[in-house]
Image: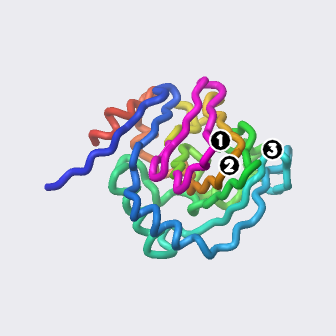
Amino acid sequence: RSYQFINVEVLSEDPMLVIFRDFAPDHYVENFLEDVGELKMMEQKVVKRGQENVSESSPSRQANGTWIDHTASDGVARMFRRAMLFLPFINFSNSDLWQVLKYRPGGHYAPHHDYISYSSPETYDFWMKTYGNRMATFFLVLQPAQEGGGTVFPELHKAVHPSRGDVVFWINVNYTGEKEEKSSHGGCPVYEGEKIAATLWIRMKGQHIFQSASSRLDIRELMQR
């Protein structure tokens, strides 16, 4: 049996924040970029305060992006299978579609939470009703900016500058399943070049290993399962 090693850089244990260095080989990244290169990128919006199912333009988020199915094309599907293979403790089937984002010079995203706060169950959208809230974020860097474009976690006093093929992974909920306040994060402004990333939001339902875990998730233990 052959093994491949991935360098796991633990930045925070509570809540979990790690970087999987060199997660995706260069040819995987290149194939993914080729597959999404012709897709139309739209202006990205934010959820309107007090209206969870309404989006609006905002100066707090300056990026273009699109959605693509987990296995819509060969390169995209190959990356999805790699995620499932190397992180078997995650049920990737219960995740949003890939969201591919491009940040050009001046592009940024002010600090925010990926966890969605709904005013009541009556306002739940399809994803929340079917799969639960965004439990974790899988953030794959396809192309880093030449200058700027890092990701900051202000509550954890951490700033990360991933390289091509790196994955930043963090938990958005606490052990009760509510929003983890310290998971707040933001995309720093791009000063030169173009930053391209692909995100999978892992949903709560079907993540049995997390639901059965204690309040403190140990990434080292999970990687051995």
Q: Which residues are magenta?
A: 141-168
What's the amino acid at mark 1? Answer: Gly
Which residue is under mark 1? Answer: 148
Circle 2 crowding by C-alpha within 10 Å: few under 14, some 14–19, many from 20:
some
Any magenta on residue 2? no
Which residue is under mark 2? Answer: 192
Between the C-alphas of marks 1 and 2, the distance is: 7 Å
N-term mark: 3 or 1: 3
Question: Looking at the picture, how far across and down is residue 3, in whole percent?
Answer: 21, 51
Between the C-alphas of marks 3 and 1, the distance is: 16 Å
* Label 2: element kind: strand
- Colouring mode (rainbow / by chain / secondary structure / one colour): rainbow
What's the amino acid at mark 2? Answer: Glu
What's the amino acid at mark 3? Answer: Ser
50 displayed left or right of 12: right
Circle 3 crowding by C-alpha within 10 Å: few under 14, some 14–19, many from 20:
some
Any magenta on residue 164? yes
Which residue is under mark 3? Answer: 60
80 displayed left or right of 180: left
Examine the image and state in which quarter residue 212 appears. Answer: top left
Q: Tell me the mark number nearer the camera, choosing from 1 and 2.
A: 2
N-term mark: 3 or 2: 3
